[in-house]
Image: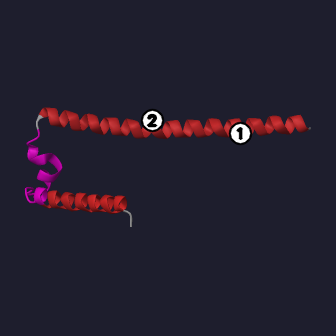
Amino acid sequence: MKSNLICMLITIVAYLILMIVVGILASKKNKDTSDFYLGGRKLGPIVTAMSAEASDTTGCSLQNGCEFILSTTARLQFQTFSRTAITITNIS
């Protein structure tokens, strides 16, 4: 294998191992489900507001992305249909 591929694989494996270790260490601090879901109610208002805004932004991005794809696809289908119809009428 090429050295670039080996370096990328080593980096990905190291990252995954690091994430597993961080997850295990963080899970030991949770005593029950309220600690997991609510952060033990130790989060301040700034962190809570940032989390809410990140959730809203993600939701809007997903919705707008789907809307854009659907509108573009519908427009392309209409253009294809109209070009086909014009071609058929020109042939007749």
Density class for disc 1 (Cα within 10 Å; few <14, some 14-19, many ≥20) is few
Residue drawn where x is 20% and y is 33% of the image: 49
Q: Do residues under tags 1 and 2 come within 8 Å of each other at their CB atoms? A: no
Q: Which x, y percent locates residue 73?
A: 60, 40
Give the number of marks: 2
Q: What whole-number distance in Å separates the C-alpha atoms at marks 1 and 2?
A: 24 Å
Which residue is disc 2 drawn over? 64
Q: Decide which of 63, 86 is in the foreground and name it.
A: 86
Compared with 24, 34 (above or below) is above
Residue drawn where x is 34% and y is 61% of the image: 3
Q: Which mark is residue 80?
A: 1
Q: Secondary structure at mark 1?
A: helix
Residue drawn where x is 63% and y is 35% of the image: 75
Q: Which residues, given as a range, are shown in magenta?
A: 25-43
Quarter-of-image position of residue 44? top left
Left or right: where 2 falls relative to 36: right
